[in-house]
Amino acid sequence: MGRVALEADGLAVQDARLPGRQGRLLFAYLAVERGRPVPRDELAAALWGEAPPATWDKALTVLVSKLRSLLTEAGLDGPRALTAAFGCYRLELPEGTWIDAVAAADAADEA
């Protein structure tokens, strides 16, 4: 993926503010999933491949916490936007949120 950024109500969070490569991947993965509860082990595979670190569970929790803080800085309610339940994380972005990767996939499907 290319650059990842979040903009809400005129406030922007550039990809340099996201917590490293895994933070950018986590945000992009959850954003593309558009509200689907994503299992923690699926996220671990997306972030670290077939050989996640021994402490991946803790590392994922830290990344989610940092992402919630950035969502809050962007004017969203971070804890309500990025929720955890039943071993899954779900990112709910406001109605009308535009995600370029989703828009590109939708355009390709229409072609």
Image: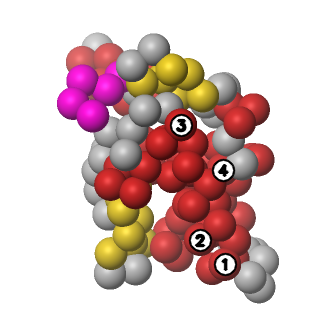
User: Please, what is the three-letter code of the amino acid marked with disc 2?
Assistant: Thr
Element marked by disc 4: helix
Name the residue rendered at 66%, 78% in the picture: 58
Q: Which one is earlier in the sequence, the residue at label 3 or at label 4?
A: 4
- The percent coordinates of residue 35 (x first, y second) are 29, 50
Label 3–label 4 contact, CB within 8 A: no
- The percent coordinates of residue 51 (x first, y second) are 75, 75
The residue under label 1 is 58
Pick the front one: 85 or 80: 80
Mark 1 surroundings: few (<14), some (14-19) or many (≥20) residues within 10 A: few
Badge number at residue 73: 3
Name the residue rendered at 78%, 77% in the picture: 53
Element marked by disc 2: helix
User: Please, what is the three-letter code of the amino acid marked with disc 3?
Assistant: Glu
Q: Which of marks 3 and 2 is in front?
A: 3
Where is residue 50, by image quadrant?
bottom right
The residue under label 2 is 61
Disc 4 to disc 1, how far (Cα)? Answer: 14 Å
Disc 3 to disc 2, how far (Cα)? Answer: 19 Å
User: What segment is highlighted magenta in the picture?
Assistant: 94-98
- The percent coordinates of residue 14 (x first, y second) are 65, 26
Mark 2 surroundings: few (<14), some (14-19) or many (≥20) residues within 10 A: few
Badge number at residue 23: 4
Label 2–label 1 contact, CB within 8 A: yes
Left of 91 or right of it: where is 55? right
